[in-house]
Amino acid sequence: KGTVLRTGDGGRSWQDVSPPGAVADGLELRDIEAFDARRAVALSIGEGAASRILRTEDGGATWTEAFRNPDPRAFYDCLTFFDSRHGLAVSDPVDGKFRVLATDDGGRAWRVLPDAGMPAALPGEAGFAASGQCLVASGPRDVWLATGGGAAARVLHSADRGLTWRAADSTVPGGDPARGVFALAFRDRTTGLAVGGDYRTGRPSPLAAARSTDAGRNWTQAATPPPAYRSGAAWYPYGRTVALAVGPTGTDVTTDAGRTWRALDGGSFDTVACAGDGGCWAAGEKGRAARLERHG
């Protein structure tokens, strides 16, 4: 739960660079954003003081606590960065609206943004701290927030780094605390994917994927979606229509920008990310990690 692993040789070997005391304190590190080989920001989730943001500038040799949530009503789920300086983190609703933190110094200091531009949350609506992809950015100002638990599974979009938001219903089913959009992936500011479903073991998730071509204003159900709940998604950097979706029952691939999906692997993974060198990394429970490499 409180573990951070680092590789500098393409995954051949791994070093435990966990923040001191994170495991003993029961911190649940669910999201990490690395800017380069030395600088990274990690989010611990949970109610009240369990939600923390930690920062390293030396590849994990040392960590500094940059933020500890003082509000027992807040529960931070995900964080994302537009660049190496500007980033956001999101909490489940407080006083009826999602709460957003912002940094403009690479994660050293964080402040709560005003919520006047945030639409009211639906009853029971929240984010899912499953893969670190319920809040994603693309470009210098655009950011999207995925939700579930409410009557509709929604995607909220901001074009001004979190100051104002517009909400849209996705085609992924909501209506239950265990159902909704768990992960988003935007290739650019207009083209995005949403994956999710019902995370409970054995529950069907026949509508687990959707796509948008207008910055999340409208969502279209995948004609052939993944067969079950998926918690993570990523665009493949070499191919504008290729993306991956992962979950506890397998990995799926689309080659037509999310219109159809087919099974790729049966391993259990929670999250996936693709690097500029063409390698895609997936991570799952019990320290499982895998790399999908580009050939040819």
Image (spheres, rainbow, N blue to C red):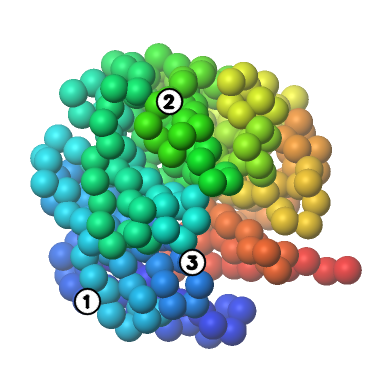
What's the residue type where badge 1 is placed? Pro
Q: Is residue 61 left or right of residue 206?
A: left
- The residue that appears at 66% across and 42% down in the rendered structure is 188
Crowding at dot 3, Cα within 10 Å, few <14 / some 14-19 / many 20+, comes out as some
The numbered dot on residue 35 is 3
**Which numbered mark, 1 or 2, is in the foreground of this view?**
2
Instruction: Give the image location of residue 39, x and y in percent.
Output: 42, 72
The numbered dot on residue 165 is 2
Whether residue 179 appears in this view of the structure is: no
What's the residue type where badge 3 is placed? Phe
Q: What is the quadrant of residue 4 in the picture?
A: bottom left
**As rendered, which of 98 and 194 lies closer to the eye?**
98
Crowding at dot 1, Cα within 10 Å, few <14 / some 14-19 / many 20+, comes out as few
Say if 143 sits above or below 272 in the image. above
CA gap between label 1 and label 3 equals: 21 Å
Instruction: Give the image location of residue 199, x and y in percent.
Output: 44, 37
**Which numbered mark, 1 or 3, is in the foreground of this view?**
3
**As rendered, which of 116 and 239 lies closer to the eye?**
116
Instruction: Give the image location of residue 222, x and y in percent.
Output: 70, 27
The numbered dot on residue 89 is none
CA gap between label 3 and label 2 equals: 26 Å
Q: Is residue 209 left or right of residue 153?
A: right
> Which of marks 2 and 1 precedes in the sequence?
1
- The residue that appears at 40% across and 50% down in the rendered structure is 87
Q: Is residue 40 left or right of residue 72?
A: right
The numbered dot on residue 20 is 1
Element on which disc 2 rests: loop
* Quadrant occupied by the C terminus: bottom right
> Which of marks 3 and 1 precedes in the sequence?
1
